[in-house]
Image (spheres, rainbow, N blue to C red):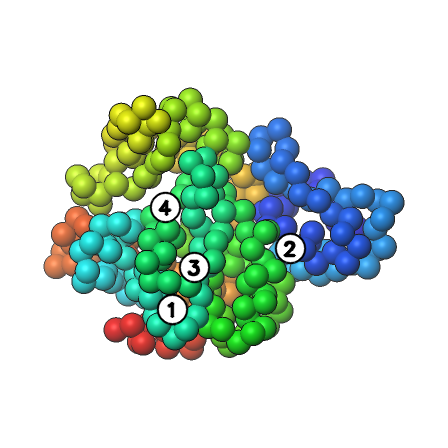
Amino acid sequence: MIQIKDKTKCVGCGCCAFTCPSHCITLKPDNEGFIYPYVDEGTCIECGKCHQVCLVENPHPHPSTPSPPKMMAAYIRNDDTRMASSSGGIFPALAHGIIKKGGVVYGAAFISNDRVQHIRVSSYHDIKKLQGSKYVQSDIYCIIPTIIKDIKNGLPVLFSGTPCQVKALNNLLGNAPQNLLSIEVVCHGVPSPMVFSRYMKEMKASSISFRNKERGWSDYDVVIHQTDGRTIKEKASQNVYMKGLIQNLTLRPSCSSCPARSFSSRADITLGDLWGIQHIAPQLFDDKGTSVVFLHSPKGTSAWHDNN
């Protein structure tokens, strides 16, 4: 049976609970608000399936001499889509391509003012729910059965998440199916859902935008809409919640030794902000956001070319 004695060895993906045939594993938050598996030893049949899908115990690293991924700087030409995105708007473009093929997209969304969970999107209009940064750990456990069902039914599926979430899904599936396109985001680490919920209640917030670019991408604001109709806007560098994240005060213990770092998640594509683009290629800098794009697989390369 799986037992978490060292909290740096668990990312909270929930794959162990999902794969347990006797349903003896439940996911519960600890006193910091992070989810961990707990085993009912009386009903455990010692089948070992939880160990087989654990991404910490089964790291599946890249070969010792991998070919370097293709890297580029890019942004979408549609300014409205770009401004609604954290960086260059590449994710919604790729999501649009999957839905155009009759597929579905999975990504992190606010399902309430203080909770983030992965959801399924099948329309162009709903892609916007998945855009923008959500600086809190997203729950993927509840959506795993739906992802697997869609993949087995042959639908084109795009899954976007943190490197550990992508790696967890790939471990669960074994060999990644051809109809699955996985995208990881460059990740600083995931803050506690409990800390985020308490922050939202303290701020009397009805919603939050972590990466508002009205003043520019390189010096973005955190914008909080309060329940009484007022709006608070402050630089991200001055926001107390963002300070806790950047200073690593609220991150999950496993983030300090991420088991999915250095492109080991087996994602098809990596997306992130290309900070410093003004020094590398000033012609691509207009302070609206530029993405760094890494293509790791033929599937990733094909998806990229299909949208260009």
Query: Between marks 1 and 2, how big is the CA–CA gap?
Result: 26 Å
Mark sitting earlier along the chain (1/4)? 1
Mark sitting earlier along the chain (2/4)? 2
Mark sitting earlier along the chain (1/2)? 2
* Observer-nearest of 239 and 68: 239
| Front label number (3 vs 4) | 3
* Observer-nearest of 148 and 221: 148
| Label annotation for residue 99 | 1
Q: Are marks 2 and 4 in contact (CB under 8 Å)?
A: no
Label 1 sits on what residue type?
Ile
Relative to 9, is 285 above or below? below
- The residue lying at 51 percent from left, 59 percent from top is 166
Coordinates of residue 31 in the picture (x, y in percent):
62, 29
Which residue is tagged 4? 133
The crowding category of the residue bearing disc 1, from other C-alpha atoms within 10 Å (few below 14, some 14 to 19, many at least 20), is: many
The crowding category of the residue bearing disc 4, from other C-alpha atoms within 10 Å (few below 14, some 14 to 19, many at least 20), is: some
| Label annotation for residue 121 | 3
Mark sitting earlier along the chain (3/4)? 3
| Front label number (1 vs 4) | 1
Query: Between marks 1 and 4, how big is the CA–CA gap?
Result: 21 Å
Q: Are marks 1 and 3 in contact (CB under 8 Å)?
A: yes
| Front label number (3 vs 2) | 3
Query: Between marks 3 and 2, how big is the CA–CA gap?
Result: 22 Å
Which residue is tagged 2? 15
Relative to 55, is 298 above or below? below
Label 3 sits on what residue type?
Val
Coordinates of residue 233 in the picture (x, y in percent):
25, 30
